[in-house]
Amino acid sequence: MKAGFIQTSPIFGRVRENVEDAVKRIRALDADLVVLPELFSTGYQFRNRAEALNLAEDTGAGYAVTRLMDTARDMKVYIVAGLAERVGNRVYNSSVLVGPREGLIGTYRKAHLFWNEKKIFAAGDTDFDVYDIGKARVGMMICFDWIFPEAARTLALKGADIICHPSNLVLPYCPQAMITRSIENRVFSITANRIGSEGRIRGRNLKFIGQSQIVAPDGTVIFRTGGRKAEGKSFEISVKEARRKNITPLNNVFTDRRIDLFNL
């Protein structure tokens, strides 16, 4: 199958403009599965929770999800995208999976909120679910989830071949850490990050590092972007690689786990 990502440079608050830019890039990409960044439609640096609620959407009827479903249907592609999800008076940092026939397939709400996100978003309350999209089984995690190995391990144990990882990275460590997440679980990982900067809060200018990437189950970085350019990339991958969990003929990353000693 062909899997890829879109690295974007959203303008804060311009939802329709950001969504249409992403849609145009998806339509130019030859892929069966494409991953977009975290909060791709709104931008990242909300000043307060009320602002986030105002820009967030109901994933069942919002502009971003509707346009992504239309695009998935037209292009026969599966799309994972991060966005602000409104549920009553709560707002979640979420990601959605949409498909060409199914429409909205699943929603994941970020479990591990980073820094001031804790002042804006409700803590995620969804499981780390895995979805069969025909050519592969995929799971979702969002940005700072990368620092908790249990997130990727849970998805892998549930059968994920590909971990889709919408992000808005400002710390430099994640691209290298996701190599380890792929190796230790023998899965593909796709990190879709953004570029640019936001300084909407005085003294808190955020610069996003880009470096979106696809990593193979053996840790090979199939491709990693730079940090200055909005772009989309897709690559042919063999899902069978993610279903081989042996490191040697006598070592398996799952069955060798000494869960009898994991008394935490």
Image: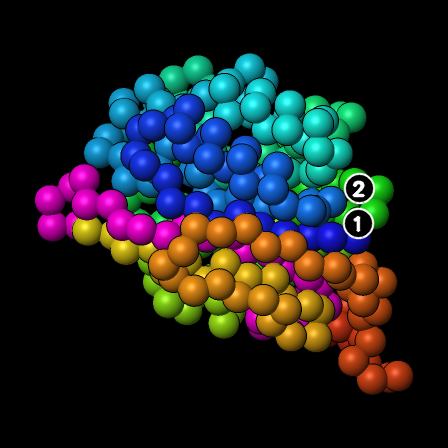
- Which of the 4 image quadrants contains residue 77? top right
140 relative position to 187: left or right: left
What amino acid does circle 2 point to? Answer: Asp
Distance of label 2 from label 1 (alpha carbons): 6 Å
| Residue 175 or residue 72, whichever sits in front | 72
In the picture shown, does residue 21 fall above or below 160? above
**Nearer the observer, 123 or 222:** 222
Crowd class of label 1 (few under 14; some 14 to 19; many from 20; radius 10 Å): some
Residue bearing the label numbered 1: 136
237 sits left or right of 85 in the view = right
- Foreground pick, 154 / 204: 204
Mark 2 highlights which residue? 132
As displayed, is residue 154 above or below residue 248? above
Quadrant occupied by the C terminus: bottom right
The total number of labels drawn is 2
Q: Residue at x 43, y 64 (%)?
A: 226
Q: For the residue marked with disc 1, what is the amino acid?
A: Ala
Q: Residue at 37%, 32% (x, y): give it.
A: 42
Tell me if I can see residue 124 in this picture.
no
Q: Which residues are magenta?
A: 179-204
- Magenta stretch encompasses residue 62: no
Badges 2 and 1: C-beta atoms under 8 Å apart?
yes
**Tag 2, which secondary structure?**
strand
Image quadrant assignment for residue 108? top right
Q: Which residue corresponds to the image point at 78% horizontal and 80% vertical from the top-left? A: 247
Q: Is residue 32 left or right of residue 228?
A: right
Mark 1 lies on a secondary structure that is loop
Q: Position of residue 84 (x, y in %)?
A: 43, 31
Q: Is residue 235 left or right of residue 255?
A: left
